[in-house]
Image: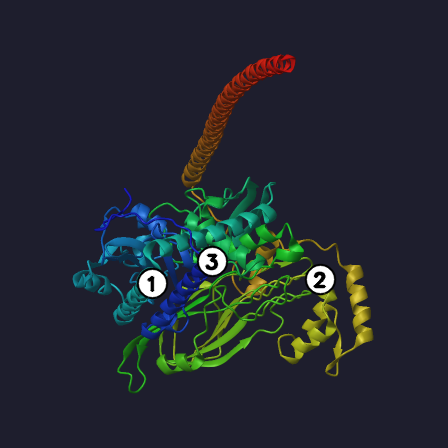
């Protein structure tokens, strides 16, 4: 049963029309609040991983839990589905357990803080942030044990818990949690910093709602989500094919002698919806390299990658999630069954980006296809007791994230020695040397490690750690076995290596995944990361650029020959370059879209010779597990198809209902109009009849008047006639009288 939000003010927020200028003001204010969350965290956290490198992900979401601004996508939806309790004003939730929040986080060291934002007793938004803690207890310092086979070995599991209830800190719970970690002081400060950052964002949301009105604030968030939906709808329609497109890549090994493990994904479009199906991905691993991938998290990866490639100006948020359908079979590397270990999930996470880049770019390689290089997020752990003078044998524990080469891309060369997460930064060497018993002997890019191409891959990094105290180290890295592939003629990148040189001069090649390695004062670790794959034909690269790379120690004179460029006496030999390039073009085969380097079998055969390490054995999955996984996949597929069909039927019915409703509405409108017209005509007829009646009355009156006048004229005429008769008679009488007088 989903969580329940308790509001003292139950008046629903209204969706209203908001002016464009107001939307822009609130949008930028929200973006600033998100940046302010980072600023608060970096100024108050204590561990180097968060304070110096920025291993944290903030976000602000609307009241439904959809991220409006942020970096890693919303984890509130999955959390709300899993949290069966009431949430009130002043509550602050803490959790780190992937299995108890639908993989809202994917391993235990990531602690999430969630703050429901209330104003005047009404829930208006969410602020949330998670940060990677330096320690979470468990088998090894740093809490990412290579050989863990269950999550119980990886440290304290914190179910969704109210760290604050109605604004009051639950100190007993906090102390219980901190009692189970090695770096309790760092964790306390980092957790307080996460809470402070979320509270800062909550205050800014309330300030905006106060200034512009609750409904305006709520509606603007909806508009921001809708903008993203429309933009992504256009991108999906234009960049995702209807025909299925499949790609597969591998994580090299599981740290326990088996590998590589396949990650396979098929992508296609149905209508406006992009579908990603991970059927064919290997079953879950025996060790901690499993990655419990939440579907919404993958949607975020897809949206972030696509928007950054197509149009970085689009505000990234969760508005487009309804346009993406993600299908991950249970019991696989990407959706392991409880209680599988998860702490080393960073390797599969990095590989997802290479797979996603290949799928999205294959349809338009000249515009969108990157080479491989978003391959991992390398980790180094170093811990022990500092016995140097003045250090009082204090416990020290370093967790540091390394950087590899970013792939060549359509826009240009890959960045040298950069994180796959754009906002991560390196820890200054001066900081490391000040706070830990270490000396950094060198920190430099590895020339020629980026794959040659029209746009070369970014070079990997070589960091030489000189240990000044006895202790233990652990290493997590990838691309030591398989190559970062090139595209469109670009060459593969150099693989990663880890070499430990002892004080007696002996050398050890260390696996890319190992822990519990004892080091002594004076030992030297060369931590070398992979280079990114190259993009495009290296024989088309401007020789002047190759020369510039040589001058900047990003390439060597020998490495320049991979581009067909001959350098003599510190300058490009143009004639020799033309000759070499002509010969290389003639001898090479056809240029393919992807250049994976040697096959897996060839890599196994040459592994010991090339890396100094034994090749991993092919993964052995128990037949029962395979059968269960297969059965579950079949059931899941059937369920998915059933759901899809039901959804399609429902959609079809809804469409029919909508059309029927629309027709009925239209008929009602027509009837209404017809009735109105008939009414209008009746009115007109009535008026016409009235006018005709009026005219008839007038005509009758006129006729009566005319009749009356005619009568009067007749009477007048009769009178005149009578008078004339009288005058005639009078005249006759007068004449008669006159005659009589004359006679006399």
Q: Is residue 360 toward the left or the right of residue 189 in the image?
A: right
Q: Residue furthest left?
A: 172
* Label 1 neighbour load within 10 Å: few <14, some 14-19, many 20+: few
In this picture, is 724 found above or below 329? above
Front residue of 731/479: it is 731
Front residue of 609/485: it is 485
Res 353 visible: yes
On the image, the x and y values in percent for residue 272 come to: 54, 42
What residue is at 81 percent from the left and 70 percent from the top?
Answer: 578
Where is the N terminus found, in terms of image quarters? Answer: top left
On the image, the x and y values in percent for residue 533 come to: 61, 62
Q: Mark 1 or mark 2: which comes first in sequence?
A: 1
Spatial CA distance of label 1 from label 2 is 56 Å
The circle drawn on residue 537 is 2
Where is the C terminus found, in terms of image quarters? Answer: top right
Q: The residue tagged with tag 1: helix, strand or loop?
A: helix
In the image, which is nearer the foreground, mark 3 or mark 2? 3
Q: The residue tagged with tag 3: helix, strand or loop?
A: helix
User: Which residue in the structure is indicated by mark 3?
Assistant: 20
Q: Is residue 11 toward the left or the right of residue 315 in the image?
A: left
For residue 628, what is the image quadrant?
Answer: top left
The circle drawn on residue 603 is none
The circle drawn on residue 211 is 1
What residue is at 21 percent from the left and 51 percent from the top?
Answer: 8
In the image, which is nearer the foreground, mark 1 or mark 2? 1
Q: Mark 3 or mark 2: which comes first in sequence?
A: 3
Q: Mark 3 or mark 1: which comes first in sequence?
A: 3
Res 148 visible: no
For residue 209, what is the image quadrant?
Answer: bottom left
Q: The residue tagged with tag 2: helix, strand or loop?
A: loop
Spatial CA distance of label 3 from label 1 is 16 Å
């Amino acid at each position: 049963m989903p969580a329940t939000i308790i509001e003292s003010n139950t008046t629903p927020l209204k969706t209203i029309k908001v002016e464009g200028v107001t939307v822009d003001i609130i949008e930028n204010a929200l973006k600033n609040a998100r940046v302010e969350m980072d600023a608060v965290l970096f100024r108050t956290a204590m561990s180097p991983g968060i304070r110096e490198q920025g291993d944290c992900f903030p976000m602000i979401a609307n009241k439904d839990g959809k991220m409006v601004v942020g970096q890693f996508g919303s984890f509130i939806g999955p959390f709300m589905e899993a949290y069966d309790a009431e949430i009130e004003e002043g509550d602050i939730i803490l959790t780190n357990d992937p299995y108890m929040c639908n993989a809202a986080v994917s391993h235990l060291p990531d602690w999430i803080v969630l703050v429901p934002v209330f104003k005047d007793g009404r829930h208006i938004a969410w602020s949330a942030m998670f940060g990677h803690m330096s320690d979470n207890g468990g088998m090894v310092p740093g809490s990412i044990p290579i050989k863990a086979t269950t999550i119980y070995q990886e440290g304290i599991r914190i179910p969704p818990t109210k760290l604050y209830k109605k604004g009051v800190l639950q100190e007993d719970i906090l102390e219980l949690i901190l009692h189970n970690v090695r770096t309790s002081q760092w964790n306390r400060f980092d957790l307080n910093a996460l809470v402070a950052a979320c509270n800062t964002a909550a205050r800014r949301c309330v300030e905006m709602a106060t200034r512009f009105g609750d409904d305006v604030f709520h509606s603007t968030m909806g508009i921001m989500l809708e903008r993203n939906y429309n933009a992504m709808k256009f991108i999906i329609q234009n960049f995702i094919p209807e025909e299925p497109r499949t790609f597969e890549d591998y994580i090299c090994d599981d740290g326990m002698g088996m590998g590589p493990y396949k990650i396979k994904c098929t992508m296609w479009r149905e209508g406006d919806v992009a579908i990603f199906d991970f059927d064919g991905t290997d079953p879950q691993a025996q060790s901690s390299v499993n990655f419990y991938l939440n579907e919404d998290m993958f949607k975020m990866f897809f949206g972030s990658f696509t928007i950054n490639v197509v149009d970085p100006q689009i505000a990234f948020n969760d508005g487009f999630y309804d346009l993406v359908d993600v299908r991950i079979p249970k019991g696989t590397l990407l959706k392991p069954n409880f209680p599988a270990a998860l702490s080393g999930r960073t390797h599969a996470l990095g590989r997802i980006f290479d797979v996603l880049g290949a799928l999205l770019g294959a349809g338009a390689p000249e515009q969108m296809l990157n080479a491989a290089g978003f391959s991992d997020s390398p980790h180094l752990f170093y811990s022990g007791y500092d016995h140097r003078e003045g250090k009082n044998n204090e416990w020290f524990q370093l967790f540091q994230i390394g950087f590899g080469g970013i792939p060549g891309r359509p826009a240009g060369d890959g960045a040298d020695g950069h994180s796959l997460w754009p906002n991560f930064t390196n820890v200054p060497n001066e900081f490391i040397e000040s706070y830990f018993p270490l000396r950094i002997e060198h920190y430099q890019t590895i020339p020629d490690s980026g794959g040659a191409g029209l746009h070369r891959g970014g070079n990997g990094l070589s960091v030489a750690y000189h240990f000044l105290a006895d202790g233990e180290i652990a290493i997590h890295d990838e691309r030591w076995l398989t190559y970062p592939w090139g595209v469109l003629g670009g060459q593969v990148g150099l693989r990663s290596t880890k070499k430990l040189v002892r004080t007696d001069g002996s050398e050890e090649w260390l696996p890319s995944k190992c822990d519990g390695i004892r080091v002594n004062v004076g030992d030297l670790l060369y931590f070398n990361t992979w280079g990114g794959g190259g993009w495009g034909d290296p024989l088309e690269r401007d020789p002047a650029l190759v020369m510039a790379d040589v001058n900047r120690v990003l390439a060597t004179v020998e490495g320049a020959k991979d581009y067909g460029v001959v350098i003599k006496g510190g300058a490009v030999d143009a004639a020799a370059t033309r000759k070499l390039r002509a010969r290389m073009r003639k001898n090479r085969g056809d240029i393919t879209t992807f250049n994976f380097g040697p096959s897996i079998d060839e890599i196994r055969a040459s592994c010991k010779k090339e890396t100094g390490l034994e090749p991993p054995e092919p993964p052995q999955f128990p037949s029962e597990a395979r059968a269960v996984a297969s059965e579950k996949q079949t059931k899941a597929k059937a369920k998915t198809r059933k759901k899809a069909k039901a959804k399609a039927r429902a959609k079809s019915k809804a469409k029919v209902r909508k059309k029927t409703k629309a027709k009925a509405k239209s008929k009602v409108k027509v009837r209404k109009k017809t009735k109105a017209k008939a009414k209008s005509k009746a009115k007109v007829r009535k008026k016409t009849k009235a006018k005709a009646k009026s005219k008839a009355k007038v005509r009758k009156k006129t006729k009566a008047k005319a009749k009356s006048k005619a009568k009067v004229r007749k009477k007048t005429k009769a009178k005149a006639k009578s008078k004339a008769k009288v005058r005639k008679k009078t005249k006759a009488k007068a004449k008669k009288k006159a005659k009589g007088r004359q006679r006399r």
